[in-house]
Amino acid sequence: MAAITFGVCILFILANLSYADFPYKVGYYNQYVDHYNLMSYGDKVFKEKYLYQDKYWGGDGSPIFFYAGNEGPIESFWTATGFVHEIAPEFKAYVVFPEHRFYGESLPFGNKSFEQPNLGLLSVAQAVADFTVFLTDLKAYLKAPNSKIIAFGGSYGGMLAAYIRYKHPNLVYGALAASAPVLMQDPKGPHDFFFKHVTKDFRDYNEKCYQQVKSAFAQQIELAMQGPSGLDVLVKKMRLCDKITQDWDFRLMQMWARNAFVLMAMLDYPYETSFLGPLPGNPVKVACDTIMAQEDPLIGLSKLVGVWYNSTGSEQCYNVSREFYYCADPTGCGNGPDAIAWNYQACSDLFLPSGSDNVTDMFPELVWNTDIRREYCQKTFNITPRIAWDAEEFMGLDLSFASNIIFSNGNLDPWMDGGVLKDVSSSVVAIMVEGGAHHLDLRASNKLDPPGVVKAREQEKKIIRYWLNN
Ligand SMILES: *[C@@H]1O[C@H](CO)[C@@H](O)[C@H](O)[C@H]1NC(C)=O
Ligand SMILES: *[C@@H]1O[C@H](CO)[C@@H](O)[C@H](O)[C@H]1NC(C)=O
Ligand SMILES: *[C@@H]1O[C@H](CO)[C@@H](O)[C@H](O)[C@H]1NC(C)=O
Ligand SMILES: *[C@@H]1O[C@H](CO)[C@@H](O)[C@H](O)[C@H]1NC(C)=O
């Protein structure tokens, strides 16, 4: 039995390597700094990075597969979007992934990009405008007036893919928006779903896991109520590097712990991945098995969060303030400069989920709502969020005027409930990916794929083919 498992394992690693490394070429596009105010930056441009692969392309008339870069270096999306690379040859498609402004290398003001007022040029509208002029120029450069552009995107990138099809149907013929919570962008849309769904993912795997997690968070509160001696026990059991001396340290620790669950639920893929960070296959199962193997729920919680925070096994203790950046997105902003950019987006025009409540979810009550957010954003960036702007500018709850968009969502993905789950019309369709976490359908095929994603990819391919033939 062991030998067979080993054999399968080796095969899988080899298959994974050949799929993970989709080769690309790199280009830089002279992109306008500001599309909307000629008096501010005039024709000033910056270098927008893009990755492309032209070796499958059939020339004018063959499609252009465009991925709407989202909040990170574009290479990570290239690697995580194997589906597009796998289907490109049979469609004779040109594949191109432009990077989102203010992420990765595409910094309009170099290392001063995150200063004010420069950061103000980061917005959804500017990003969609970047893609619009980029694609227009690309078609001219390729001498491909008859090539249809199909947009792809996952998560926020999926929102951008849907938006560009909706706003510029003359340029983009259709869009596959995977795990794109577009309805959440409307103030009247859903916002209270996120931590509930994360909880469901863990509880569906095992009721005892859910109970243990709840006890662990409750034990933290009991220890905190005992004062400094209780907090010392907490720090020791949780293996934190630093003492907890203030309310804020305690709250930050709760958010840090909660964030490990968020990432494991989102990235609950059936095989080992390293998308936002390294994770084993089926991380929700691994995390639950980890906490359930411990007598003491709090020690179990410490080990559970380690599936995410200590995946390399090199952490002697957990440094909460280094590992978790408190920001305007309660589902986390990541780390480094990309996290500052995302925090700004979460403070300006994106409308993200609310906090956890310890009633509909298994987490401590960590309230996050529009009032708290406004206060935080005023303090952090001196701006007041415009929570309705993207719904007004792009897409509200009524999608009946849209066409040629596929909205796919995985039932394991906590973002699912912010997205379009029912067909809107014959050409705006919803595909449910049974057994799928966050945009699993965009990933390369894998031996461990659940049948639901194999089926979803077939459907998606069929619809794209239909668009291209009509
Ligand atoms: C910022 O960028 C400028 C120009 O590229 C460079 O000369 C400078 O050393 C950079 N500063 C830092 C702190 O990285
Ligand atoms: C991280 O993992 C290593 C290896 O399993 C372990 O020795 C170490 O104690 C872990 N760190 C924490 C903070 O739990
Ligand atoms: C934790 O990280 C912070 C910020 O990076 C650093 O200042 C602090 O020294 C670290 N604490 C320990 C105990 O390593
Ligand atoms: C959640 O609520 C229960 C019941 O009111 C309470 O006993 C428990 O301490 C709470 N847990 C947290 C983490 O707040």
Image (cartoon, rainbow, N blue to C red):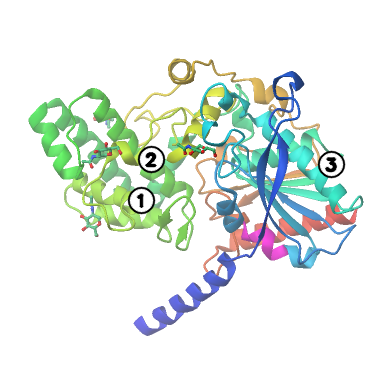
For label 1, the SS is: helix
The residue tagged 3 is 171
The residue tagged 2 is 259
What whole-number distance in Å separates the C-alpha atoms at marks 3 and 1?
41 Å
Ligand 2, seen in the image, is in the quarter at bottom left
The residue depicted at 71 percent of the width and 29 percent of the height is 395
When the figure is inspected, residue 247 is found, relative to residue 444, above or below; the finding is above
The residue depicted at 78 percent of the width and 35 percent of the height is 166
Image coords of residue 300 (percent x, y): 23, 49
For label 2, the SS is: helix
What whole-number distance in Å separates the C-alpha atoms at marks 2 and 1?
9 Å
Say whether residue 152 is magenta.
no
Q: Amino acid at mark 3?
A: Leu
For marks 3 and 1 on the same chain, the one whose residue lies earlier in the sequence:
3
For label 3, the SS is: loop
Name which quarter of the figure residue 167 lies in: top right
Q: Which residues fall within the magenta stretch?
A: 81-87
The residue tagged 1 is 308
Q: Nearer the viewer, residue 392 or 47?
A: 47
Tally the numbered discs.
3
Left-right relation of 190 to 236:
right
Image coords of residue 227 (percent x, y): 11, 26
Residue contact at pointers 2 and 1, CB within 8 angstroms: yes
Q: Badge 3: how crowded within 10 Å, few (<14), some, or many (20+)? A: some
For marks 2 and 3 on the same chain, the one whose residue lies earlier in the sequence:
3
Left-right relation of 157 to 424:
left
Left-right relation of 382 to 37:
left
**Label 3 vs label 1, nearer the camera:** 3
Q: Nearer the viewer, residue 392 or 78?
A: 78
